[in-house]
Amino acid sequence: MLELSRITAGYDRRAPVVRDVSLGVARGESVGLLGPSGCGKSTLARVAALLHRPEAGSVVLDGTAVRGWRHRAPQERRTAVGVVFQQPRLSADPRLSLRELIAQPLRSTGRRREVTERVGELAREVGLTEELLGRRPHAVSDGQLQRACLARALVLRPGLLICDEMTAMLDASTTAALVAVVETYRARSGAALLAVGHDRVLLERWCDRTVRWEELAGQHEHADAVGPRG
C-alpha cells in the first residue's frame, strides 16, 4: 500500500530532519511509528501524505510511484490518503462550520451531491450532533473539533489513513472514541493505517506492529556499514 524508501526530507537542505529512512505499510495493515517530539516522524508522515516533497528517496502508493506532491499530485493519489493532524485548530479553517469543514473534500472533488448524506453519516459515527455541526471551530472544544477533522479525513473513503499524534491533545475517553471510529472504518473498508505518536502503550494496543524511530533512523547506516554478504 505504502512504501517509503530511503527518504531524506526537511525544510532546510543543509539540515534535513529525516535522513535516509524507509518504512512500509501493507494493504489493510496498521503500523505505529513511535518516537519523541522533534525527531522527524511528523515530517515523514507529511511525505507519506503527499504534503511534503522529499529531497531524496521514493514514495510508492498503492503500487504507483509518486511524482507530484500537494496540488501537483493527481487527484486520485491525493484522495487515496486521509490525514488527521495533532492540532486541529491549525488544520481547520476558522471561517467554516464543522459541517462545511467535513464537506470540504467532497466539494473540492466535485462530489457535492454526496454532501448531505455523507456528512450526516460521519457526524453520527464520530459523535457530533446537528447543533455542533452548525458551530465554527472557536465555538467547540478541541475534542469536538478533532472529531470533525477525523470525519473530514474519512469523507472520501481513503485507502490509507495517517494519524499524526491525533490523540495527543485529547482526554482518555475522546481518545478511545476516535480510535474506535478509525478501527470501525478500517474493518469495513480494509484501509491501512499509519499512526504516528509518542505514546507507546496506545500504539502497541492500537496497531498490528509498532516501529521505533531510532530503528528507522539507523537502519541504512548499519546496512551500509556491514555491506553485502558473500
Image (cartoon, rainbow, N blue to C red):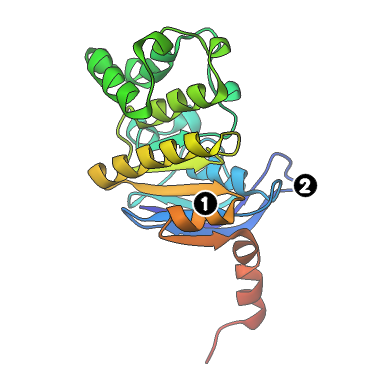
Q: Quadrant of residue 73?
A: top left
- According to the image, label 1 marks what residue? 202
State left or right for residue 189 relative to residue 91: left
Q: Position of residue 207 (x, y in %)?
A: 43, 55
- The structure residue drawn at horizontal position 62% and vertical position 59%, both measured from the top left corner, is 213
Q: Residues within 10 Å of mark 2 (few under 14, many from 20)?
A: few
Of circles 1 and 2, the one toward us is: 1
Asked whether 205 or 7 is in front, the reply is 205
Taking the spot 30% from the left edge, 41% from the top edge, the residue there is 184
In the picture as drawn, the residue positioned furthest to the right comes out as 14
Instruction: Give residue 24's position: percent from left, percent from top.
Output: 44, 58
Label 1: element kind: helix
Identify the element where label 2 is drawn. loop
Q: Is residue 4 visible?
A: no
Answer yes or no: is residue 94 visible. yes
Residue identifier under label 2 = 14
Q: Amino acid at mark 2?
A: Arg
Q: Position of residue 28 (x, y in %)?
A: 31, 53
In the picture, the disc for residue 225 is: none
Picture quadrant where residue 160 is located? top left
10 Å neighbourhood of mark 1: few (<14), some, or many (≥20)? some
Q: How many marks?
A: 2
Q: Amino acid at mark 1?
A: Leu
Q: Residue at x 45, y 41 (%)?
A: 176
Relative to 215, is 65 on the left or the right? left
Question: Do the residues under discs 1 and 2 have CB atoms within 8 angstroms?
Answer: no
Residue 151 location (% of width, % of height) = 38, 27
Residue 19 vs residue 214, the one in the foreground: 214
Q: CA distance from mark 1 to mark 2?
A: 35 Å
In the displayed structure, 116 sits above or below 144; it is above
Write the residue at 33% across / 27% down.
155
Whichever of labels 1 and 2 marks the residue nearer the N terminus, that label is 2
